[in-house]
Image (cartoon, grey):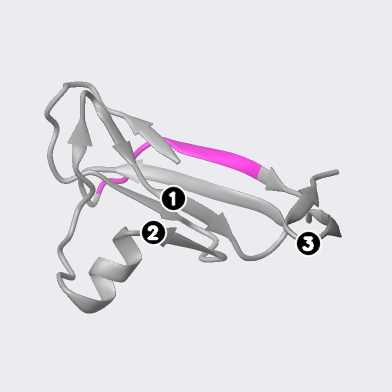
Amino acid sequence: MVARTAALDESNVSIVDLNRASTMFPQELIWDTVNPYFTLPVVLGHAVTLWTPTAPGEHSLMAYQTSAGGPVTTVDVNPATPIGPGCVVAP
């Protein structure tokens, strides 16, 4: 998941799944174990996190800098079909 920022060096950028049916690495690991105020670093105007949905269906993803929120994108997640060891085909 990549959130583009208005400036190349924005601060306090976070990305969240409003459905809470996913994991986001590394931010959730850091929030839960090291720093509850962690925000994603911004590199050349982009904040990046690894988003892994844990349930099929619609997911609403939001990138924000303040408690006022930010833009929301809705993504439809379809379950993948395993076809062998280490191989997955998405429908």
Q: Are marks 1 and 2 in contact (CB under 8 Å)?
A: yes
Cα gap from disc 1 to disc 2, whole angstroms: 5 Å
Q: Position of residue 5 (x, y in %)?
A: 26, 27
> Which corner quadrant of the image does residue 82 belong to?
bottom right
Identify the residue at horizontal 23%, vertical 52% (top origin).
67
Q: Say whether residue 33 is left or right of residue 50.
A: left
Read off the residue under disc 2: 25
Identify the residue at horizontal 36%, vertical 42% (top origin).
63
Q: Position of residue 81 (x, y in %)?
A: 85, 55
Provide the residue span drawn in magenta: 68-75
Read off the residue under disc 1: 50
Say what amino acid the circle numbered 1 marks. Answer: Leu
Residue 85's disc number: 3
Q: Residues within 10 Å of mark 3 (few under 14, many from 20)?
A: few
Q: Earlier in the sequence, mark 1 or mark 2?
A: 2
**In magenta segment, residue 1:** no
Name the element at disc 2.
strand
Q: Say whether residue 54 is left or right of residue 78.
A: left
Name the element at disc 1.
strand
Q: Say whether residue 87 is left or right of residue 34.
A: right
Q: Earlier in the sequence, mark 3 or mark 2?
A: 2
